[in-house]
Amino acid sequence: MLELFPGYCIDTSAVIDLWRRVYAPDVFPSVWKEIENLISQRYLITPHEVLNELEGYFDKNDELLKWAKKHKTMFKDLDDAQLQQVQNILKEFPRFVDENKETPEADPFVVALAMSKGWTVITSEQPANLNANPGARPKIPNVCEHYNVKCIYQLLEFFREQKWKF
């Protein structure tokens, strides 16, 4: 069932880029206040698999991981409809995930959660040029485009859509 007031489903890459590369909370605390407001209003969510990825990437004492665990309401469990969507996505795009990684990739779960709610995906991944390189692994924007899921892959676009001014 699609939501009346659409929100956002954020990918691991966007969370990491926001925290580490672009809008570090010690420099941009007002950005993080707005992000936390969206989380508390339940308009910024992500599948639990994103937390699994963060746990696989970072030491348990990492500040980003501590922040993520503090905001555990943003992490959503997989339901049967989303599981079916993940299976459909992987059938259509078998190269979407790297099967050799130790930690399962969250990407198909992010897209499936956004699809199930009719929400927008936020990622830092750039689309792969599948026309020029048909053997390239598809990225989140490619899969979102295929399924007509809105995808933001420039963080400033997300801020502009929210009409945030800092």
Image (spheres, rainbow, N blue to C red):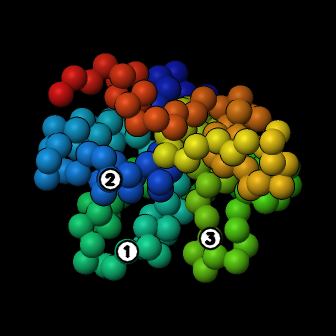
- Residue 64 horizontal side relative to residue 103, left or right: left
Mark 1 or mark 2, earlier in chain? 2
Q: Which residue is labeled 2 in the image?
A: 21
Q: Specify the label residue 104 is tagged with.
A: 3
Q: Amino acid at mark 1?
A: Phe
Q: From the viewer's perspective, is the residue at label 1 or at label 2 nearer?
A: 2
Image quarter of residue 32: top left
Looking at the rendering, in which quadrant would you find the N terminus? top right
Report x, y in % for residue 115. Answer: 65, 37
Q: Nearer the viewer, residue 166 or 4?
A: 166
Report which residue position mark 1 lands on. Answer: 58
Report crowding for label 3: few under 14, some 14 to 19, many 20 or more residues within 10 A (C-alpha): some
Q: Position of residue 93 (x, y in %)?
A: 81, 52
Closer to the camera, 58 or 45? 58
**Vertical placement of 55 versus 30: above or below?**
below
Q: Tell me what residue is drawn at x 54 percent, y 27 percent.
A: 3
Assign a secondary structure to mark 2.
helix
Distance Cα–Cα, label 1 vs label 2: 15 Å
| Left or right side of 151 for 30 | left
Amino acid on which the number 3 mark rests in the picture: Pro
Residue type at mark 2: give it: Arg
**Left or right for 85, reference 19:** right
Task: Left or right? Give the position of 42 relative to 28.
Answer: right
Q: Nearer the viewer, mark 2 or mark 3?
A: 2
Split into 4 quadrants, where in the image is the C terminus?
top left
Residue drawn at (64%, 46%) of the image: 140
Gap between marks 2 and 3 measured at Cα: 23 Å
